[in-house]
Structures are given as C-alpha cells and as structure tokens.
Amino acid sequence: MDYIPAKKESILRVDRLYTVHYFEYVKDYVFGGEKHDFWEIAYIDRGTAGIVAENRGYTLKQGDAVFHKPHEYHNIWASGGFANSVIISFSASGKAMDYFKNKILHFDEEDKRLLALIVREASAYFSEPLNIVELPCMTKRKDAPAGGEQMVRLYIEQLLIGLIRKGNLAKPHPISEKSTEEGKEKIVEAIKTYLAENISEPITLDDVVSRVCFSKTFVKALFREKTGTGIIHYLTELRINTAKHLISENKYTFSEIAAMCGFSTIHYFSNCFKKETGMRPSEYSKSVQSKGIL
C-alpha cells in the first residue's frame, strides 16, 4: 500500500517570539503607549484595566484580552486600583490572523490553561524575570529546557486557533468619560515626568511623541487641552524656573546652569531667560541678592 500524506494546511504561524511578561500594575500606574511591527496580546488576569488602541478606549475586566495588530498605537493603565496582566509579543503570518484585528476576546478555562503554560514555559526558558517593563529582548537560560522557545510558539498557535474556532467575543465596556479623562491626565503626567527627568537633554517634540507613542497631533492637542500651553513652551518654562532656582542658590556659573537646564549655549540661555523673565540671568541674580534672599 502506498501511503499518501494528508494535505498540509496551516492557517496561521507564529514566526517569532519577542517577549512574554506578567505585570502587576499598582494604583495610578499608566503605560504611556507604544507601537511596533508585531502582534501583542494583553490579557487581564486580575483587576480591571483601561486601554486605548487607535483612539478607541475600553475597560477590560478579568478574563478579557485585547489583540493589538502591528503598527497600532496602544496604551494601558490600572483603572480599578490594580491590574495584573499577561503581555505576549510575537510576529505571525497567515490570513487567519486578520480575525484578531480590533478584537477583544474573553478567555475560557481552556484558553487560561494554555496561557498559564505559555507563562510557565517562558519563565523556565528565559533568564530575565517576566515583570521587567522595558525589556527589548529576552535571552535563553543556560539551563533552559530543550525546545522551550518553540514550545511557547506552539502554545500560542494552539491558543490562537482555539480562539478562532470558538469566537469568544467579549463585550468590553466603553471607557466612561471619567475614566477617559483619568487616562488623559496620566498621559500628560507621564509627559511632564519625562521632561523633568531629562531637562538637561536636547529634547524635541518628536522625542516626547515617541515616548508616549501616540500621534503627534493627538499628543500636542491633549497637552494643550490639559495645561493651556504647548509642550515646548512648557519645557522652556520648566527650564527657566529651574534656572531661577539654581541662580538663587549662588553655587553655579551661568554656563553650568545653562548646561544643567538643557540650553545648548550660554547665549541661547540668556536670550530665553530674558524673553521669559524680562531680565538677563545676571540681572536676575542681582535682583535676587538685593532682596536679601541669598
């Protein structure tokens, strides 16, 4: 008897694994956002989380998962006080992956079992802890079990195919107006923190936009809506106010203060300072001393 192999069929394939994470988001945590050229699954294991993807906002509860397609802007924050999540990043091919575009699904017990296997296998295979937020790549343990990375990819494929078969569509709650405003405030606070922590660096608007990973138009409009000023003007005011404080301490030269506050030259610093305060740095220093502050 001549055996004839079954016709090969592959509706989708996980081509590459990037990261597997298990995060515990505390109250007021916000991830500013990102976009990348691969798929990402964000599953809520406990608590509730707010997510925004391509300007659509939802509240996800325990058992819900959102699928972010390649090149999709997205962010997440703990909307109910805390949230635990599993984040899986991977590249995949196959027409069947179109099913997951703009999808939020609810995982049943079998889906959760596969998800637990993915996390367990990744934890045994990769050397890095799964709760590191900014981790560009994961590396193999020296004592990793054979085929661990392949097993993770196979489990993901099994999970994806099972979801397509079942079509467990969740009914996510649209983010309330209060939650939407909360999310916007967190994004603005993340921008302010970034500016303050990098005040000595030559920050551009593109730097800020890439940090929060939303469109430039959205970020500019949101920041102005919440603060009443533009990002670059806010940064300039922050630098000048910091410079005023440093001048009042009488510990640094004007050149040192200019560098500490992110001004490229002493001349540029002096011009910006006068534009904001009406005085040159040297004039401001004399005025502060004359008031007996120093």
Image (spheres, rainbow, N blue to C red):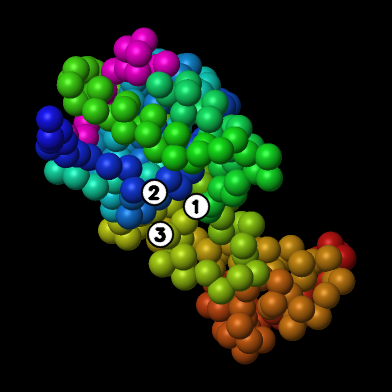
Residue 151, image x and y in percent?
45, 34
Mark 1 to mark 3 CA distance (whole Å): 9 Å
Q: Which label belongs to residue 191?
A: 1
Please report the residue visible at 65 percent of the width from the left and 43 percent of the height from the top.
141
Asked whether disc 2 touches disc 1, contact meaning CB atoms under 8 Å apart, the reply is no
Amino acid beneath label 1: Ile
Mark 2 to mark 3 CA distance (whole Å): 28 Å
- Asked if one can make out residue 101 in the rendered structure from this viewpoint, the answer is no
Q: Is residue 13 above or below residue 105?
A: below
Labels 2 and 3: the sequence-earlier one? 2
In the drawing, does residue 148 fall left or right of residue 246?
left
Q: Which residues are magenta?
A: 96-113
Q: Is residue 218 above or below residue 86?
A: below
Q: Is residue 104 magenta?
A: yes
Residue extending furthest toward the top: 109
Amino acid beneath label 2: Arg
Residue 193, image x and y in percent?
58, 50
Q: Which label belongs to residue 126?
A: none
Mark 2 to mark 1 CA distance (whole Å): 32 Å
In the drawing, does residue 208 fall left or right of residue 276?
left
Please report the residue visible at 36 percent of the width from the left and 40 percent of the height from the top.
40
Q: Is residue 151 above or below residue 17?
A: above
Tag 3 residue = 209
In the drawing, does residue 61 fall left or right of residue 194?
left
Q: Which label belongs to residue 16?
A: 2
> Helix, strand, or loop for circle 1?
helix
